[in-house]
Amino acid sequence: MTPMIRSASEAFLERLDDISVDDLCGEAERRSVFGDARPTYDFTI
């Protein structure tokens, strides 16, 4: 069973390498994860 898990883990990590943070954000916006309004950020320190 260990070789099967290793193979699945490697396939998962290869797929994960193809996904960027920008891809994740775009998908979240497309699915309206945060609702209709985009969050506003205040970076004032």
Image (cartoon, rainbow, N blue to C red):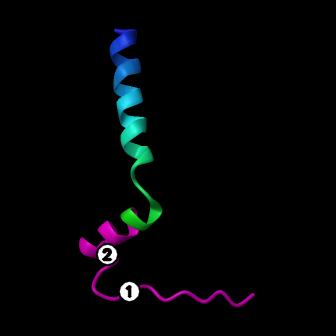
| Tag 1 and tag 2, C-beta contact below 8 Å | yes
To which residue does mark 2 refer? 29
Where 10 falls versus 4 (above or below)? below
The magenta stretch is 24-45
Q: Is residue 16 left or right of residue 35?
A: right
Mark 1 neighbour density, 10 Å: few (under 14) some (14–19) many (20 or more)? few
Amino acid carrying mark 1 in the image: Arg
Measured as percent of width and height from the top left, residue 44 is found at: 70, 90
- Residue 38, quarter of picture: bottom left
Measured as percent of width and height from the top left, residue 21 is found at: 46, 62
User: Which residue sits at x=75%, y=87%?
Assistant: 45
**Farthest right residue in view:** 45
User: Which residue sits at x=65%, y=86%?
Assistant: 43
Where 42 falls versus 18 (above or below)? below
User: Which residue sits at x=27%, y=86%?
Assistant: 36
Q: Is residue 40 left or right of residue 28?
A: right
User: Which residue sits at x=40%, y=10%?
Assistant: 2
The numbered mark at residue 38 is 1
Q: Quote the CA–CA distance across marks 1 and 2.
A: 8 Å
Measured as percent of width and height from the top left, residue 15 is found at: 36, 42
Secondary structure of residue under mark 1: loop
Where 19 falls versus 34 (above or below)? above
Image quarter where the N terminus lies is top left
